Image (cartoon, helix red, strand yellow):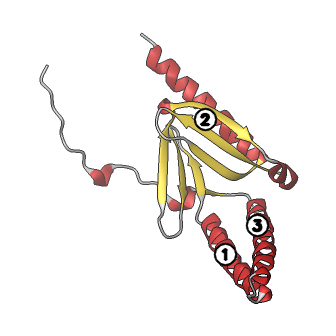
Amino acid sequence: MEFSNDPIDLDGVPQLDPAAFRPLDPAHRRLIVLGHLAFGLVVAVVGGVAAAGIGLGAGLVALGVLLVVAISASLALLEVRHTGWMVRRHDLSYRRGVIVRSVETLPFARIQHARIERGPLQRALGIATVKVNTAGPDVRISGLSIADAERLKTIVVERSDATADESTDP
């Protein structure tokens, strides 16, 4: 048998349709805002007290901290708008990022495990995170509705099992 490794015509390779990516649940935005608000208030209070202790304007320091937190929250909300996921017949794709954008595509044949995680705030907001473990890098998709998280986990597990069964058939 002779080895060959011919080039592939890239124009014939199917592309990921940006419109086919599913957005995160809107409740994820509330989680982002709540997290930044809580962090900002704690840092503003601590910074204000520390600034007052060394003779700086406590209000000015607290205002500066809150401004930085507001900018950070705005960027995080913008990133949520650019985050999405898609399931195709043979793989799962996850995109994210505003300045540095990335798309990860995980073939079901490489997926080993999937699980749903829900912290206290996620439970209160009715959202979840699906964590997918692979033979390569792992992926965490946060901000899914509970129904989407359950469906995604079920599809990933079923398809990865089916792919594993196909590869072990004689």
Residue positioned 73% across, 58% down in the render: 25
Name the residue nearer the viewer: 142 or 8: 142
Residue positioned 78% across, 85% down in the render: 58
| Mark closest to the chain's N terminus, 2 or 3 | 3
Q: Distance between the residues labelled 2 and 3?
A: 34 Å
Q: Classify mark 1: helix, strand or loop.
A: helix
Counting other residues with Cα less than 10 Å from the Cα at mark 3, is it few (<14), some (14-19), or many (20 or more)? Answer: few
Q: Using the rendered view, name the quadrant where residue 125 is placed.
A: bottom right
Counting other residues with Cα less than 10 Å from the Cα at mark 2, is it few (<14), some (14-19), or many (20 or more)? Answer: many
Q: Where is residue 149 in the image (x, y as percent from the top left)?
A: 72, 44
**Up-down relation of residue 81 to residue 53 (above or below):** above
Q: What residue type is labelled 1?
A: Ser
Q: How far apart are marks 3 and 1 (CA)?
A: 14 Å
Q: Distance between the residues labelled 1 and 2?
A: 32 Å
| Mark closest to the chain's N terminus, 1 or 2 | 1
Residue that carries the numbered disc 2 in the rendered image? 156
Residue that carries the numbered disc 3 in the rendered image? 39
How many numbered marks, from 0 up? 3
Q: Which image quarter is the C terminus in?
A: top left
Q: Classify mark 3: helix, strand or loop.
A: helix
Q: Which image quarter is the N terminus in?
A: top left
- Checking the image for residue 57, the label placed there is none
Q: Using the rendered view, name the quadrant where residue 74 is placed.
A: bottom right
| Mark closest to the chain's N terminus, 3 or 1 | 3
Residue that carries the numbered disc 1 in the rendered image? 74
Q: Which amino acid does label 2 sit on?
A: Val
Of discs 1 and 2, which sits in the foreground?
1
Name the residue nearer the viewer: 46 or 114: 46
